[in-house]
Amino acid sequence: MKPTPPAELAPAALTTQATADGTVLAFSGRLDATGAARLWRPALRAARAAGAGPLGFDLHAVSGIDMLGATLLAAAEAAHGSPAAITGADTKTNTLLARARAAGTSPKAPPRAPRITARQMLAAGTAVVTGALAFLGEAVIAVVRLPARRRMFRLQDVLREADQAGFRALPLVLMLGYLIGLILAFQSSIPMRQFGADLFVANLVSISLLRELGPLLAAVILAGRTGSAFAAEIGTMKVNQEIDALVVMGIDPMTLLVLPRMLAALLVMPVLTLLLDFAGLLGMTTVMAGFGYSLPAIQAQVQSAATVHDLAGGLAKAAVFGAAVAAIGCRSGLGTGIGPRAVGFAATAAVVGGIVATIAIDGLFAVMFYRLGL
């Protein structure tokens, strides 16, 4: 025969007793994590089977109990629907059971959905505008003080940023420009063919690219590639407290970090736009040649529709777009918060802000050109 284990080591067991006073659940052994897991379902079934009659717990044979065992007793009471009469419980058991009952019956506050009021929206918008104006003012002051701080402004930084923003973006710009010209020509030829005006697709695509789509697409590429890179680089410096170190050493971050990036973006954007326009016209020429039109005919249509003023206006807009995208990227980096996710938030804000600002500025240019008759 196997020796009988001591009472404190005996496994948990449950016996259901039906008495004249109701149903009694007699527990024995240790009501710890193992015992509570073993008796959980039987105890809840027995408590439900007691129905509306009284329920009691006999704990005389329980050798030990912890919080999980008390949680089992409270869950059995909840399954029965009313408190049970406890017999054989010591002070520790009563204390644990009271805590388990309180945890199970304490009302939980429903989660409140955040509500954004008009005042909060107005305050957030005011803060954004104020911050943008403050950054613009600091940039202007940095430009005015540049002659006295020439040692902080390094030409190598401008060339490096121009290489990153311009030369390394050429494959993407040429590919997207060619595809955009191809798609515009194909889509425009469908309605134009109904009137026998396929040849005027060259007019439409050339004007669209030179005046609007070329600068806009180049600015979107710049915001996605370079604006986010500016924000990530400066944001990492801000998180690592390198910006604070520059200030302590008497070096102006606007002159050292912001101005070279803005100048580089301002210089490369017209070049990127010009190359995107050329690639788009090449894509349009590919489609028109496929329709059977000769190259001299296509060239004549482009020259008759688009003028030097259209190209100059697009390049001027591109320069402004480049400066705006670079400024927003640098401002997002300088405003980076604390934490591992702050740099990602700064890069996202730079891309979104750059695209939104580009479209808004393009709208202002459209109104100005309309008023000037350009």
Image (cartoon, rainbow, N blue to C red):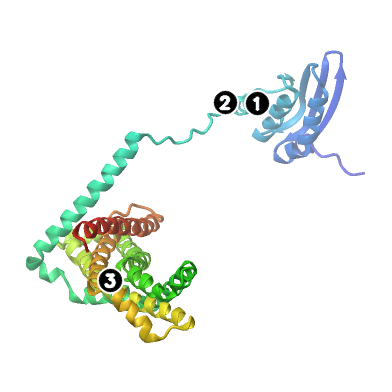
| Mark 3 residue crowding within 10 angstroms, few (<14) / some (14–19) / many (20+) | many
The image quarter containing residue 371 is bottom left
Q: Amino acid at mark 3?
A: Met
- Alpha carbon of mark 2 to alpha carbon of mark 3: how far? 61 Å
Query: What count of labels does the image hold?
Result: 3
**Kind of residue indicated by mark 2:** Pro
Q: Is residue 220 above or below residue 172?
A: above
Q: Which structural element holds mark 2? A: loop
Q: Secondary structure at mark 3?
A: helix
**10 Å crowding of disc 2: few (<14), some (14-19), many (20+):** few
Read off the residue under disc 1.
97
The residue to which callout 3 is attached is: 269
- As measured in the structure, the alpha-carbon distance from the residue carrying label 1 to the one carrying label 2 is 18 Å
Does any portion of residue 240 appear in the rendered image? no
Q: What's the amino acid at mark 1?
A: Leu
Decide which of tag 1 and tag 2 comes sooner along the chain. 1
Kindly give the residue lying farthest to the top in the view shown: 20
**Residue ID at (65%, 26%):** 97
At 30% across and 56% down in the image, what residue appears? 357
Query: Of residues 230 and 56, which is closer to you in this image?
Result: 230
